[in-house]
Image (cartoon, rainbow, N blue to C red):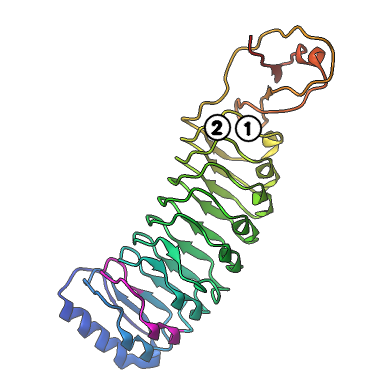
């Protein structure tokens, strides 16, 4: 295996010399690292490295992916973070062995048509710090994806197709403009970590309560007032909900007839401290029956 790497800034000629050496290795070259070399174009000569496994072009000035990249069918890791890309390139579909794709810190505002088609082995996709306003339905084609990070974008919604990524274990959507989470999130059965910090989310879907493998939930900085029924049964190890206007008031007596009503109550969960939780009660008679873990709230 031949590896060529430089991790410090150097003049452009040094980058060219490094690439020439890599090309001499031919099909035996496995890793090429050209970080921070002020490269404006991806070298088309990469097509002469069919055995390449890792290509690291972080911190450059690349605005487009060269079409010759379609020959790198054995590439497993591609890092184009902190460049000048404006879309997830369509050329990605040819990288059928790719497992990790880093596209953070660009100006990406869309997925090119077909970009997801050939990425059946992708397990990690990092699109942090871009300008995405929506996620295409084609995201569901990334069947092996386990880690998806979309922090610091401009997303105002999540397509239900994202919730069909059955292998997803970590989903990061912090610092966007989301107002809700689709009910279909219940299909992410393997999800262990969900980060939704600093959005505009008003309520969590009841489907969230079906995620029995969820261990970390961060919803800090939203506008959530109450949690859905069944939330207390989640086996969370970490819950962050600071800076939400959670419905916290002292209980008062409700004097009404004993008809059947649907009201809001609180419940203390077994693995959390105190969260406002919506449940159903049978009547106002039940509303006045308090216990150590359950009591009613009414406005007068």
In this image, 217 relative to 176: left or right?
right
- Residue furthest to the right in view is 259
In this image, 287 relative to 98: left or right?
right
- Residue 60 belongs to the span the image colors magenta: yes
Residue lying at 25% horizontally and 69% vertically, measured from the top left? 61
In this image, 241 relative to 286: left or right?
left
Q: Determine which of the numbered discs, if any, sits on residue 224 in the image.
A: 2
Q: Determine which of the numbered discs, if any, sits on residue 59 in the image.
A: none
- Residue 184 belongs to the span the image colors magenta: no
What SS does tag 1 mark?
loop
Residue lying at 58% horizontally and 62% vertically, measured from the top left? 137
Q: Does residue 1 appear in this view?
A: no
Instruction: Report how far apart the C-alphas of labels 1 and 2 lie in the structure.
Output: 8 Å
Residue lying at 21% horizontally and 83% vertically, measured from the top left? 16
Nearer to us in this view, 113 or 34? 113
Locate residue 141, reporting x and y percent.
60, 69
Locate residue 10, reporting x and y percent.
17, 72
Mark 1 near mark 2, Cβ–Cβ under 8 Å?
yes
Circle 1 sits on which residue? 227
Locate residue 280, reporting x and y percent.
76, 26
**Stretch of the chain drawn in magenta:** 56-72
Nearer to us in this view, 299 or 236? 299
Quarter of the figure with residue 64: bottom left
Magenta: predominant secondary structure element? loop
What SS does tag 2 mark?
loop
In this image, 39 relative to 153: left or right?
left
Locate residue 185, reporting x and y percent.
64, 50
In the rendered image, the vertical position of residue 164 relative to residue 219, given as above or below: below
Screen quadrant of the N terminus: bottom left
Residue lying at 61% horizontally and 39% vertically, measured from the top left? 204
């Amino acid at each position: 295996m031949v590896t060529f790497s430089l991790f410090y800034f150097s003049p452009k000629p040094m980058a060219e010399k490094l690439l020439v050496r890599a090309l001499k290795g031919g099909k035996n070259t496995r890793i090429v690292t050209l970080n921070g070399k002020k490269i404006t174009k991806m070298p088309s000569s990469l097509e002469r490295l069919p055995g390449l496994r890792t290509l690291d072009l972080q911190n450059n000035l690349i605005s487009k992916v060269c079409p010759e990249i379609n020959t790198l069918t054995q590439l497993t890791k591609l890092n184009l973070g902190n460049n000048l890309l404006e879309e997830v390139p369509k050329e990605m579909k040819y990288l059928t062995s790719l497992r990790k794709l880093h596209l953070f810190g660009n100006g990406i505002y869309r997925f090119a048509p077909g970009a997801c088609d050939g990425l059946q082995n992708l397990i990690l996709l990092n699109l942090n710090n871009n300008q995405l306003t929506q996620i295409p339905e084609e995201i569901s084609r990334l069947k092996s994806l386990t880690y998806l990070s979309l922090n610091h974008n401009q997303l105002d919604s999540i397509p239900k197709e994202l919730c069909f990524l059955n292998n997803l274990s970590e989903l990061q959507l912090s610092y966007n403009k989301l107002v809700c989470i689709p009910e279909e999130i219940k299909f992410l059965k393997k999800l262990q970590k969900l980060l939704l910090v600093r959005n505009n989310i008003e309520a969590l879907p009841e489907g969230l309560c079906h995620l029995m493998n969820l261990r970390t939930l961060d919803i800090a900085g939203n506008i959530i007032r109450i949690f859905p029924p069944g939330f207390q049964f989640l086996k969370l190890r970490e819950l962050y909900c600071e800076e939400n206007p959670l419905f916290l008031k002292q209980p008062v007596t409700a004097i009404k007839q004993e008809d059947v009503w649907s009201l809001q109550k609180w419940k203390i969960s077994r693995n959390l401290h105190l969260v406002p939780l919506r449940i159903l009660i049978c009547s106002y008679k039940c509303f006045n029956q308090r216990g150590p873990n359950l009591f009613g709230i009414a406005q007068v």
